[in-house]
Amino acid sequence: MLCLLATTIGWKKCSLFRLIPRRLHLIIDWLRKRYHASVLFEIRQRLRDIFRPRALRSCRYYIHDLVTHPIQDDIFMEIYWVSEPVGPGPGASIYIGDDEVMRFDCFGSVEGHYHFNVRQSKFVPDGELIRIYFPPGTVADHINNAAIQLRRNLVYGRGTNLDPKVRTVKIDQQAIDEAAELMQQELTRIARLHDSSRLPLEEAAV
């Protein structure tokens, strides 16, 4: 109905369409104050499922040479090369269902970092994606740290996710330990493939 109205009288002439963007932030603020974040997250998830397909990190333009590995039912990981300006370097994403619960950017130096529950950055003031930095070190150091964080903290990432479907997924720790070892090997492989000068063989031993 709104589309028919807009095409009939013109988008710019329709005051309704001019008011929506101006008032949208007020509506969002009101919803945030009135309802718990988990309720808003559930609404957003359902709208996303209706209007657009699953948005994996592999769909983004700065990801190259992606490989996907299953970990267990409803959990899988993506390994890739990241060509972001802050990098570049090897990276990995851990998904429970279609939610990116952990993301690792193993850039080396002081730039390497990881994230929990990437989609939930929308609920952080200014929408900033929170980074947890690895201790300064080589790419190999950050790859090793990423494997440790996956083993220790996937349960934490699941528990702090706002989606009830994610929080109820049971995690097989043995499968996660095996996945961490595989992730370490794959990140090392892709780092050597793209920039072996940053990952000498003696540093890359797994």
Image (cartoon, rainbow, N blue to C red):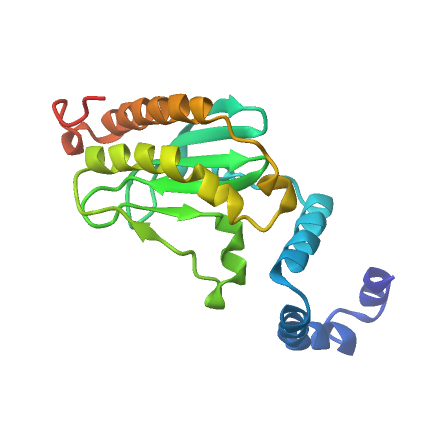
Q: Is residue 101 left or right of residue 27?
A: left
Residue 181 placed where, x, y %? Answer: 33, 23
Residue 81, by quadrant, is top left
Give the left or right position of residue 3, taking residue 56 as reference: right
Judge by depth and name the residue closer to the eye, 72 or 142: 72
- The quadrant of the picture occupied by the N terminus is bottom right
The number of discs equals: 0
For the point 33% across and 51% down, the residue is 132
Q: Quadrant of residue 150?
A: top left
- Residue 52 vs 40, above or below: the answer is above
Quadrant for the C terminus in the image: top left
- Residue at point 71% right, 48% down? 46
Position of residue 53 measured from the top left corner of the image (x, y, whole percent):
65, 40
Above or below, comparing residue 157 to residue 66 in the picture? below
Between 198 and 161, the one lying in front of the other is 161
Look at the image and tell me whether residue 62 can be seen: no
Residue 20 place in picture, x, y as percent: 71, 73
Say whether residue 199 is left or right of residue 5: left
Name the residue at 40% across, 30% down: 79
x, y (%) of residue 205? 18, 22
Is residue 175 in sight in this rendering? yes
